Amino acid sequence: QVQLVESGGGLVQAGGSLRLSCAASGRTITRTFMGWFRQAPGKEREFVAAITWSGIRTRLADSVKGRFTISRDNAKNTVFLQMNSLKPEDTAVYYCASFIGDYSGSYYKTSEYDYWGQGTQVTVSS
């Protein structure tokens, strides 16, 4: 079992930055694939970013490329999502998720992930 707890959300003006953290417990997150998803009101949960356990391979949604960065610190069992140049359309609840394994070609699908955090709200004002 893996427990995931997100933090770092909040209210920020357009153009600002936030750094989300996802702390894992229950087992080491080594050899777990980690992802970030978001869900805006009335919309489906969508993929944002993902990272392999080694941190070597990352994936980003087209909508956040050039603005968001995903990283991880396995020694601290924590994954980060650095969000810069935020836009109002980035407003959503952001979820951390994971599955045991190195990589999956379906990393962008919610069904691929076994463990989910409770989410943290990010609100970007215009």
Image: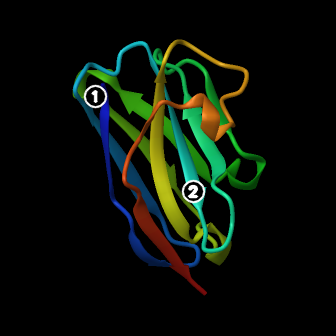
Neighbours of disc 2 within 10 Å: few (<14), some (14-19), many (20+): many
Disc 1 marks a residue whose amino acid type is Asn
Image coordinates for residue 72, horizontal then vertical, percent: 40, 30
- Circle nearer the N terminus (2, 1): 2
Answer left or right for 78 relative to 94.
left
Q: Residue at x 68, y 53 (%)?
A: 64
Q: Residue at x 47, y 15 (%)?
A: 54
Q: Residue at x 54, y 12 (%)?
A: 102
The C terminus is located in which quarter?
bottom right
The N terminus is located in which quarter?
top left
Q: Which residue is mark 1?
A: 77
Query: How far apart are the alpha carbons under marks 2 and 1?
Result: 21 Å
Disc 2 marks a residue whose amino acid type is Arg
Image coordinates for residue 98, horizontal then vertical, percent: 46, 31
Please tell me whether residue 102 is drawn above or below residue 61 in the rendered image: above
Q: Which residue is mark 2?
A: 38
Answer left or right for 111 relative to 36.
right
Answer left or right for 6 relative to 89.
left
For numbered disc 1, what is the local secondary structure?
loop
Q: Identify the image quadrant of residue 50.
A: top right
Q: Which residue occupies the foreground of this view, 35 or 57?
A: 35
Q: Residue at x 65, y 46 (%)?
A: 47
Image coordinates for residue 124, horizontal then vertical, percent: 54, 77
